[in-house]
Image (cartoon, rainbow, N blue to C red):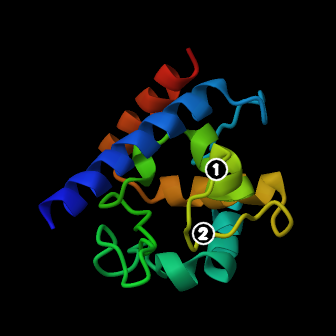
Amino acid sequence: MYLKNKFFIFLSLAMLLALYFLITYSNKSNASINLNTTDNSVIENGKKIYADNCASCHGVNLEGQKNWMSRLPDGLMPAPPHDETGHTWHHPDRYLFMVTKYGIEEFIGEKYPNNMPAYKDILSDEEIIAVLSYIKSTWPTKIKEIHNNINSRSKR
């Protein structure tokens, strides 16, 4: 059991490192992604799109699924929260956009079993940005500031 847990920790760290390099060096899109948390029409549109496309897994109140940090019996991870208790704000805007648009597997370029669908054929870029803007608009000011710093560092 100890070796199994150690393996999953190692695998998780390796995946995070791979994602970091893919975020930094991916050629899928060089466009800058900037979330808009000041335009109420963008936020309200994002809230509606979130309710229609995301809330069934990530929760009506962005709370995610119970025990989201523990694997399900099928080996998949539950949907994480998108509020300040989750890890969404640990990732730059571009990463959040790319994973939402392309899905994790296409974005990282390798098999990674998960339940998160790609939205490239479902939502427009503007709709994805609206959803992410809505999510960010719900975070406390301090978390938004930290997230803005993460964005600044990722654009270097």
Instruction: State the residue position of label 1.
Output: 110
Residue 128, above or below 113 = above
Question: Which residue shows up at 71% across the image and 67% down it?
Answer: 45
Q: Position of residue 23 (x, y in %)?
A: 59, 33
Question: Which residue shows up at 35% across the image and 43% down it?
Answer: 13
Where residue 62 sits, quadrant-wise, is bottom left
Q: Position of residue 38 (x, y in %)?
A: 59, 46
- What element does badge 1 sit on? loop
Question: Which residue shows up at 55% across the image and 69% down it?
Answer: 114
Q: Is the N terminus in the top left, top right, bottom left or bottom right quadrant? A: bottom left
Q: Position of residue 27 (x, y in %)?
A: 76, 29
Q: Is residue 127 visible?
A: yes
Q: Position of residue 53 (x, y in %)?
A: 67, 77
Of 69 and 82, nearer the camera is 69
Instruction: State the residue position of label 2.
Output: 116
Which amino acid type is marked by label 1?
A: Glu
* Residue 64 located left or right of residue 118: left
Q: Is the C terminus in the top left, top right, bottom left or bottom right quadrant? A: top right
Residue 16, above or below 44 = above
Q: Please tell me how crowded label 1 is: few (under 14), some (14-19), or many (20+) other residues with Cα within 10 Å.
A: few
- What element does badge 2 sit on? loop
* Residue 135 located left or right of residue 31: left
Q: Of marks 1 and 2, which one's residue comes earlier in the chain? A: 1
Which amino acid type is marked by label 2?
A: Met
Asked if labels 2 and 1 touch by Cβ distance under 8 angstroms, the answer is no
Of 7 and 66, nearer the camera is 7
How far is mark 1 from mark 2, CA to CA?
A: 15 Å
Question: Which residue shows up at 44% across the image and 53% down it?
Answer: 88
